[in-house]
Image (spheres, rainbow, N blue to C red):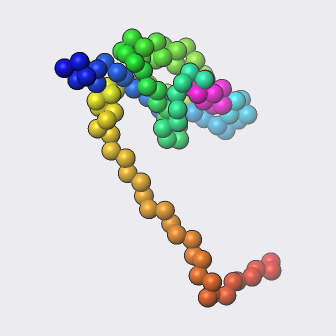
């Protein structure tokens, strides 16, 4: 019973962002925000998506508030949380990696210009 309840008390906080990187200042803000997330214990889940395990709902709220305090001045940031039970039901799919053409029987093509 206690184990079942913990699945709904343990939380995962996700931060998904789309930040501009056109100017030097934008890139600096992007790097600063990303570094903040890593320093606060988030790990990269995908590009522009970071996740952090939190031991309780209260702990998740603390980290959500910290993210809000450190928001970059421009761009879009989405913060959401899911329970550990929901996280356990995530499905991950990976595409096939393209094979390099290493057929040595074919001559190499040289380009001079």
Q: Which residues are magenta?
A: 30-38
Between residue 22 and residue 100, name the one nearer to us: 100
The residue located at (33%, 28%) in the rendering is 84
Q: Is residue 4 shown above or below 112? A: above
Quarter of the rendering occupied by the C terminus: bottom right
Residue 82 percent across, percent down from the top left? 34, 26
Our reading of the magenta stretch's main secondary structure is helix
In the rendered image, the residue lying farthest to the front is 2
Q: Is residue 53 shown above or below 100? A: above
Q: How many marks?
A: 0
Residue 45 percent across, percent down from the top left? 48, 38
The residue located at (58%, 18%) in the rendering is 70
Between residue 44 and residue 71, name the one nearer to us: 44
Residue 101 percent across, percent down from the top left? 57, 76
Q: For this view, does 78 lie left or right of residue 24?
A: left
Q: Is residue 49 magenta?
A: no
In the rendered image, the residue lying farthest to the left is 1
Q: Is residue 31 magenta?
A: yes
Q: Is residue 8 visible?
A: no
The residue located at (61%, 88%) in the rendering is 105
- Quadrant housing residue 81: top left
Q: For this view, does 18 lie left or right of residue 33?
A: left
Quarter of the rendering occupied by the N terminus: top left
- Quadrant housing residue 34: top right
Q: For this view, does 92 lie left or right of residue 109?
A: left
Between residue 14 and residue 19, name the one nearer to us: 14
Residue 73 percent across, percent down from the top left? 60, 22
Q: Is residue 94 visible?
A: yes
Q: For this view, does 33 lie left or right of residue 57?
A: right
The residue located at (52%, 15%) in the rendering is 66
Q: Is residue 94 shown above or below 76? A: below
């Amino acid at each position: 019973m206690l184990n079942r309840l913990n699945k709904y008390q343990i939380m995962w906080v996700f931060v998904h962002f789309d930040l501009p990187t056109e100017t030097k200042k934008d890139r600096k803000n992007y790097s600063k925000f990303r570094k903040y997330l890593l320093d606060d214990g988030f790990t990269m889940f995908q590009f522009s998506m970071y996740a952090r395990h939190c031991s309780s709902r209260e702990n998740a709220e603390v980290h959500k508030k910290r993210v809000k305090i450190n928001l970059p001045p421009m761009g879009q940031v989405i913060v959401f949380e899911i329970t550990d039970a929901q996280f356990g039901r995530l499905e991950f799919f990976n595409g096939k990696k393209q094979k390099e053409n290493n057929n040595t029987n074919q001559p190499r093509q040289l380009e001079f210009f």
